[in-house]
Image (tube, grey):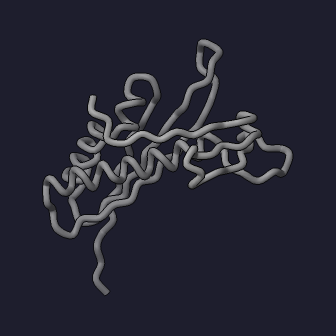
């Protein structure tokens, strides 16, 4: 595989510690998802949701550019959950909600399915994390 880009981050203290990109462009305090301390910060599931949402939305742009439809826009929301699996470990659970404007339902579903085939996060999770795709159509109204 030809690598286009690579980055790294370092965490100290796990879910109640701190994580930073190694180029120091972003650093965050972390808190567990059951934060009872009142400490502010993000958790790994939130960071994963942000990464997946932005990566998937970009995959939609990539597919759209190849198809060249006019007047199409979209937004992607990734909802990431964590829970215990049957083996006693932990697993993620993901819903991708994609709002599409400017396409009919069938065309929007085809766009989302194609994006799911090429998105690096989708490829990384396929077969080991439940990912559900939800597509909604937003009507374009000129006022």
Residue 4 screen position, x and y as percent: 31, 41
Classify the position of the C terminus by image quarter: bottom left
Which residue is outermost to the top?
A: 87
Q: Residue at x 30, y 69 (%)?
A: 139
**Residue nearer the viewer, 27 or 112:** 27
**Residue nearer the viewer, 64 or 24:** 24
Which residue is outermost to the right?
A: 37
Left or right: 81, with 143 as reference point? right
Classify the position of the N terminus by image quarter: top left
Q: Residue at x 57, y 55 (%)?
A: 25
Would you place residue 140 above or below residue 29 in this image? below
Q: Quadrant of residue 43?
A: top right
Residue 96 screen position, x and y as percent: 43, 45
Q: Quadrant of residue 14?
A: top right
Q: Residue at x 21, y 46 (%)?
A: 110
Would you place residue 87 above or below residue 66 in this image? above
Q: Residue at x 28, y 44 (%)?
A: 115
Left or right: 1, with 65 as reference point? right
Would you place residue 101 above or below residue 62 in this image? below
Residue 124 screen position, x and y as percent: 40, 30
Total marks in image: 0
**Residue nearer the viewer, 108 or 35:** 35
Residue 112 screen position, x and y as percent: 28, 47
Which residue is outermost to the front?
A: 23
């Amino acid at each position: 595989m030809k690598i286009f880009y690579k980055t790294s981050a370092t965490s100290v203290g796990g879910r109640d510690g701190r994580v930073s990109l190694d180029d120091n462009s972003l650093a965050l305090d972390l808190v567990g998802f059951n934060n009872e301390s009142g400490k502010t910060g993000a958790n790994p599931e939130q960071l994963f949701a942000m990464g997946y949402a932005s990566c998937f939305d970009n995959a939609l742009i990539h597919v759209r550019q190849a198809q060249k439809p006019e007047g199409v826009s979209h937004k992607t929301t990734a909802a990431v959950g964590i829970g215990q699996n049957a083996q006693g470990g932990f697993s993620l659970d993901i819903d991708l909600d994609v709002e599409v404007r400017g396409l009919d339902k069938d065309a929007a579903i085809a766009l989302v399915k194609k994006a799911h085939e090429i998105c690096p996060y989708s490829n990384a999770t396929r077969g080991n994390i439940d990912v559900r795709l939800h597509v909604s159509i937003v009507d374009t109204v000129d006022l």
